[in-house]
Amino acid sequence: MPAKAPVSGPISDPPTEYTVHAGMASDVGRVRRSNEDALAFVCPDDVALRRRLGVLAMVADGMGGHRGGEVASTLAVDTVCRGYFAAQPGEDRLRVLERAMLDANRAICQAGLADPSLEGMGTTATALVIVDGSVFFAHVGDSRLYHCADGHCRQLTEDHTLVQQMVKNGVLSAEAARLYPMRNVLMRSLGTYSGLKIATRSCAAPQIGDTFVLCSDGLHASVDPAEIAEVVASRQPREASQRLVELACERDGSDNVSVAVVVVRPAASGEEAAAMADR
């Protein structure tokens, strides 16, 4: 369902008016019996709230078995979205997003302690916010955020995995890491321990044509950044997200696959800047 959200920025860089379009797709894959991923694109109905806090896109990839993974990813998305949009006027919005992620971590930990069947559950989480002249994100785990522009695709997040740590330490090459047997072992995830550190970052101001892709590891395990850039450059957000999911399932399909494609576009002449969710 489309939802409108006015978003405006300074007179010059970034553009004064723009629209944000989002398309999302998710698939259980060819092996799993359940989908433990969760996706969201939130655009508040309240005009003042939209102007102050913008729009939020998020992906979470749960773990801990059929029920645990689904509970963890859904709890993460719900907690972060509610927490971010509860921010008070004047609060630092990036810090609010970080706090919302920490609240999600605490909620998942508590749910696991309260129900023995959920013990050990956790989830990755990547959340992106576009508001006024700002783009920022918070991240834990190996879900990813990419920025695509001018035919190029760049990874903005860093995987919190054992294999990524080995690459940073010079133990493995980036190429060898793609085939390493323990490449999915996480070093950080929501719900696993109370002292979790959330990775946060502010990006360059939004520009017309910017495309952001959030995805679970079911996509990036088999579809490389160059292919992602090609797909999002030639399709509408919903079609692009669906095509990326299809590619991942065709090539592998051993995991759930979830993708959100978020595009910054110019506002039509005489049209109030808006955010549109195309599902």
Image (cartoon, helix red, strand yellow):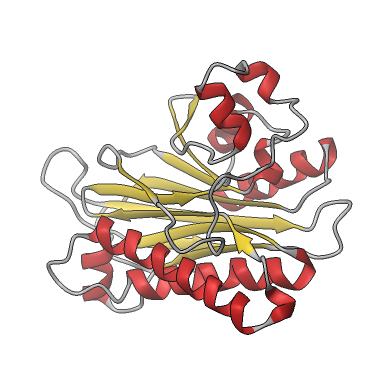
Q: Is residue 133 left or right of residue 244?
A: left
Residue 33 screen position, x and y as percent = 86, 63
| 28 on left or right of 192 | right
Instruction: In this rendered view, identify the residue nearer to me: 138 or 115.
Output: 115
Question: In this image, 99 relative to 10: left or right?
Answer: right
List x then y, in percent, for residue 63: 69, 60
Answer yes or no: is residue 230 visible.
no
Look at 73% across and 33% down and name the residue there: 222
Q: Toward which corner of the image does residue 246 lie, by quadrant?
A: top right
Residue displayed at 49% across by 24% down:
151
**Nearest to the observer: residue 106 or residue 149:** 106
- To which quarter of the image does residue 54 belong? bottom left
| Whether residue 75 can be seen here | yes
Residue found 78% across the figure and 31% down from its top: 181
Residue 54 shown left or right of residue 246 in the figure: left
Residue 228 horizontal/vertical position (percent): 60, 33
Q: Where 65 falls versus 140 (above or below)?
A: below
Quick one: quadrant of the C terminus? Answer: bottom right
Q: Is residue 120 above or below residue 129?
A: below
Residue that protrudes farthest toward the bottom in the picture: 114
Count the labels in the image: 0
Q: At 69% from the left edge and 41% from the top edge, which residue is drawn?
A: 184
Residue 185 lies, in percent from the top left, at 67, 42
Task: Say which quarter of the image contains residue 144.
Answer: top right
